[in-house]
Amino acid sequence: MIDEQPSQQDDDPPFETVSFRFDRMTIARFRELFPRARWSDSHQAWTVPGKTARRRIDRWLATEATRQSPFEEEKGRDAYEWEPILSPYLQVYDRGFRIRTPFSRAVVDELRQIPFARWNRDDRVWEIPFASYDDLQDRWKTIEEAAKRAEPEERRKRAEARRGTEDEAKARRRTAERRKRRMPVSSDDPPPPGRPVANPAYGIVIVTEVTGEIVDLEEIAEHYPNVGDDHVWAGWRPATLVELVRTWPAREVPGEYERSRGWWLPTLDELRDARRIAKSRERRKRDRAEAENSRSNGPS
């Protein structure tokens, strides 16, 4: 059950994440200090809402670090000395390890599952305490492989390898279909226009209209394989950050029926992911506008 409607934030993230080893006493202390925290299956971490969430989490992590026995920290230091991770993505500092890689969703997902991992927003680096070295070591192969694949040169090589292949052709067709800003929905149960709904192909969107035009199953089979002959086209546009923040999440996970009709009311985890993406999109748009304004007002 949702305790309250999410409040709108300005430039602050709508939530922060934190992970730590499962321990009844630790969980109890955490829930006492963060009663609005919720576990996120998609992030595999606890999510804490609020403008000051990051600062409060950092203070709590520092307090919890003092509860760990010196043996655990020393054990992590010794394990690193005995079997160090040698990688350009990892650095050692006085309290543990710092990991800096090209952006990769796979890397972030792995790091979030390491106990007491935290994102240092100022330095744009992940920090892991010595006590979590065993967990870091267990996941490092996956982390490093994903980081290497995210390097610009590796991305370029993969793009070159796909050139002229059927995979590239499929990607182009997917892009062309997305630009049409349409999605198939059940004619018997269409989505409500004007409010954010989730769609399996495009995430959370705003339906602008339900045209009533029946979809051509042969034409769209490649993009929408599970669509039936009772589906019609609906137009959509991306949801803005303000619209996403004002949206109440669904209380239940969508079932088979909701997914088969082509839309459902978004869950809290889905809304959080969409808000983060929308915030980044709007920030990029604002930065471009400011840069263009600076150029137009600059010296001629």
Image: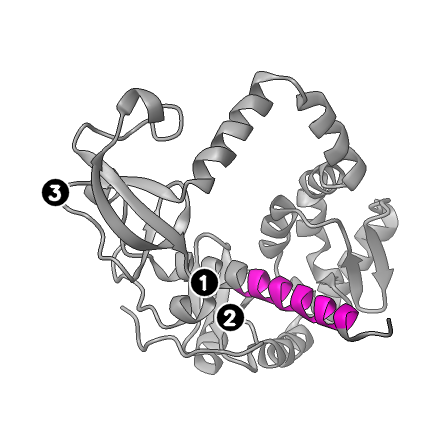
Q: Is residue 217 magenta-colored?
A: no
Q: Is 92 situated above or below 55?
A: above
Give, as a three-letter code, the residue at label 1. Answer: Arg
The mark found on residue 54 in the picture is none
Residue that carries the numbered disc 2 in the rendered image:
15
Decide which of tag 3 and tag 2 comes sooner along the chain.
Answer: 2
Secondary-structure class at tag 3 = loop
Name which residue lies at 33% across and 41% down.
183
Choose the circle earlier in sequence order: 1 or 3. 3
| Span highlighted in magenta in the image | 279-296
Position of residue 280 measured from the top left corner of the image (x, y, whole percent): 59, 62
Task: Determine contact: label 2, label 1, CB under 8 Å.
Answer: yes
- Residue positioned 27% across, 26% down in the render: 216
Mark 3 → mark 2, Cα distance in angstroms: 37 Å
The residue mark sitting in front, 1 or 3, is 3
Structural crowding at the residue carrying mark 2, measured as other residues with C-alpha within 10 Å and reported as few (<14), some (14–19) or many (≥20): many
Question: Which of the two discs, 2 and 1, labels the residue nearer the N terminus?
Answer: 2
- Three-letter amino acid code at the position of disc 2: Phe
Q: Is residue 220 above or below residue 66?
A: above
Give the quarter of the figure containing the N terminus.
bottom left
**Residue 73 position within the rendered picture, expressed as x and y whole percent measured from the top left:** 75, 64
Quadrant showing the C terminus: bottom right
Say which residue label 1 marks.
272
Residue 152 falls left or right of residue 61: right
